[in-house]
Structures are given as C-alpha cells and as structure tokens.
Amino acid sequence: MSKTRYHNLEVAEVIEETHDSKSVVFKIPQDQKDAFEYLPGQFLTLKVPYDGKQLVRCYSLASSPHVEVVHKVTIKRVDGGRISNWINDEVKVGDSIEVMPPAGLFYLNEASNDVILFGGGSGITPVISILKSALKTTDRKVKLVYANRDEESVIFREELKQIEQNHSDRLDIVYIYDTVHGFLNPDMVKEVTTGHVGAEFYICGPGPFMDTVENTLLSEGEEKSRIHVERFVSPADPDEAAALEAEAIAAAGDSTVTAFKVELDGEEHTIDYEKGDTVLKSMLKAGIDAPFSCEEGMCGACMCEIEGGESQLGINEVLTDEELEEGWTLACQCRPISGNITVKFPD
Ligand SMILES: Cc1cc2nc3c(=O)[nH]c(=O)nc-3n(C[C@H](O)[C@H](O)[C@H](O)COP(=O)(O)OP(=O)(O)OC[C@H]3O[C@@H](n4cnc5c(N)ncnc54)[C@H](O)[C@@H]3O)c2cc1C
C-alpha cells in the first residue's frame, strides 16, 4: 500500500490534556496497521477542509510505538490558529479525518549515549515519544528538560510523574516555568547538560527556545550531528503553495536537462526529464518506486543528494542550511536546471 495516500481515520478518543490542549487518538483499521507503523518522534499529517481550502497540518505522535498500541497526537491552541483551534473546539469521537501515514526525520537513533530531551510547550509531543521508547528499548540514561509558561500548562504531567517513578534510576526530569525561572537561558542549558558530554540531543519547542539550546550546545563543543531539532511550522496555504510552485517552475524555466541519473537501492536509472517537473515527478513517471511522503517539502522522506550540475529547490521546511551546503535536497521540490545530474538516495 502506498505510504502517501491519505487515509480516512476515525477518531477513537479525545482527551482534554490542559486548558489549551487536547489529544486525539485515531483508530487504525487492521489492513492499514503496516502503513501506520512509526518511529518514536515521527508525525502524522492531517488534511482538513477549512473555509473552502484543504489545509495540511503535521502533528507529532505523542504515543510510543514500543509502549502503546494507540496512535495519539496532541494539539495545543495557537492564538489565531485555524486548525489547532478547530481541533480543540470541534473534533469529537466518531469523526473522520484524512491522515497521511507517519513520516519525519526526528526520531530516536540507534546508539548507546545518553538521551537529552528539550521540550517547550507543545514541543513535548515528539520528545515524550522518544523518552518512552528510549526507556523501554534501551538502557540509555534519559533526561527531559521541559519548559512551560507555568505548572498549569504542563501537558502529560501525570503520565510523566508515573514514568519518572518507574524509571528513577535513569530518568531525570527538570521542569522550567517562565513565571518562576524566566525563559531558558544559556547558563541553564549548561547546568542541565553538565555530565552529559557526547549525548544525543533532541530539541522541540518555540523558535527562541530551540535556538538557545542549540547555540549553547554548539558553543560548548557538542557535535551538530548529535543535535536534532524539530520545528513546528504550518505549511503555506494551497493558494500560496501554488504561487510558490509557479515561482519555482519559473526559476528553473530555462532548464537544459533532458535526462538525469538516479542511484536508488544499489541500482542506477536514467530518467527522462520534462521541463517543469520535479525530480520526484520524473521518477514516478518513469515507474521508479521513489521514497516520498508529504510532497510539500515538509517531511524529508524524499531527501537525496544531487551531484554534477545545477538544480533549484522550491519549498523547504526540513533541511538545515548545513544539509543544503552538503548537497542534500528534496526530490519533491527539486528541479534540475543544467549539467549531468546524478541524484543519489541514501541507503
Ligand atoms: C513536524 C511537525 C510536527 C508538529 N507537531 C505538533 C504537535 O504535536 N502539536 C502541536 O500543537 N503542533 C504541532 N505542530 C504545529 C502544527 O502543525 C501547526 O502549525 C499548529 O497547530 C498551528 O496551526 P493552525 O492551523 O492552528 O495555525 P495557522 O492557521 O497556521 O496560524 C499560524 C499563525 O499564523 C497566523 N494566521 C492565521 N491565519 C492566517 C492566514 N490566513 N495566513 C497566514 N497566517 C495566518 C495565526 O494567527 C497564527 O499566529 C507541528 C508542526 C510540524 C511541522
């Protein structure tokens, strides 16, 4: 079954978590269980009809595939936000929502170093999934630094208390409240990471929170490759996305490429290229089983390297500046412009 198709999933449960957040549990039909397998930290993509448009929003799974059978996402209200408030106000048990199978590059890696998690507000969702899986499937030490406006706003307070009691030997949770401690600052980051040099760091929360953590870790000499960041953003509305796509097509308009090479799963293919198409579209037209998911430049499932020529990348919400410099691109948003291009997908 294609990983990309939206599936109509029934809402099995709606849980009021705090005054401004709710969890939604989806019922996964037996024949779709494989498509909805996920790694701790990955997200679901929901497509919601809203005001005459189809709006797409990603929500990280707060459940753990190693601990729970349910697929649970948790949505915090955003001031003036359309879908977060719609979910909190309108969604009820028995409703059907179009959901794309799990995707994303922010997940627990296979290593044995300490796992240090930084969650801010709703950014707790992917990190609690990673936390639960790390405790269940490894013997790594885990530390969660969890920042919120105040105690009232803490999502999963009871669940975390339970987990902490059951794993007091290797789990440490540090709560930070804006109203008591102020915003997380570099000194606090240094203090909470003392003794964890060389750990794996996972960060998700408001922009300034993530920047403070990441910059402090880098200034303390931690390697970029061990610092994982998930940014919660909304993709462009369909009309804005269409305008951005038109811009991207125009920017790649004088492409001289008529074919390009692809290395995928140890095989090399030569793919015909029609001006305006993306790398992904060309591959799918050629019948190649390319990896992809959202097709919106959001999930990173079609991440690949491009060599031997010039290309143009449209919407990119997932690759960092460093990854772009290293030559990574997104097949769903990349258009070849010139040269003997070879597209390489990671093994
Ligand atoms: C990988 C990933 C995982 C995520 N996981 C979670 C999660 O677990 N939990 C969670 O709560 N969120 C999560 N998010 C964020 C989520 O996807 C949404 O971005 C968030 O819920 C806000 O969506 P919204 O429709 O309510 O707000 P939007 O309507 O997108 O509004 C966002 C901001 O833009 C303003 N705005 C309002 N109308 C418009 C308009 N017409 N045009 C432009 N801007 C407008 C709003 O005032 C608001 O400040 C995740 C995001 C990503 C990318």
Image (cartoon, rainbow, N blue to C red):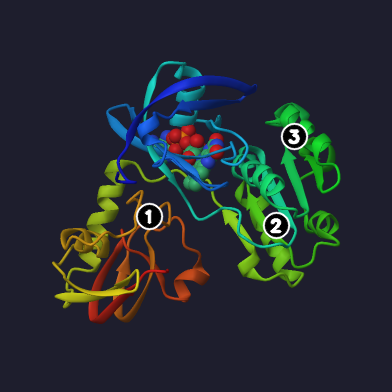
Q: Nearer the viewer, residue 3 or 332?
A: 3
Name which residue lies at 61% across and 68% down.
Answer: 225
Residue designated by label 2: 212
State yes or no: discs 2 and 3 in contact (Cβ < 8 Å): no
Q: Label 3 amino acid?
A: Leu
**Looking at the image, is 314 positioned above or below residue 40?**
below
- Upstream in the sequence, badge 2 or badge 1? 2
- Which picture quadrant has residue 168? top right
| Whole-percent x, y for residue 48 in the image | 36, 30
Q: Is residue 180 shown left or right of residue 122?
A: right
- Upstream in the sequence, badge 2 or badge 3? 3
- Which picture quadrant has residue 317? bottom left
State yes or no: discs 1 and 3 in contact (Cβ < 8 Å): no
User: Which SS class for mark 3?
Assistant: helix
Work out whether residue 78 can be spotted: no
- Upstream in the sequence, badge 1 or badge 3? 3
Distance Cα–Cα, label 1 vs label 3: 33 Å
Q: Label 2 amino acid?
A: Thr
Crowd around label 3: few <14 · some 14–19 · many ≥20 (10 Å)? some
User: Which SS class for mark 1?
Assistant: loop
- Which picture quadrant has residue 262? bottom left
Residue designated by label 3: 160
Nearer the observer: mark 1 or 3; the answer is: 3
Name which residue lies at 25% across and 48% down.
Answer: 242
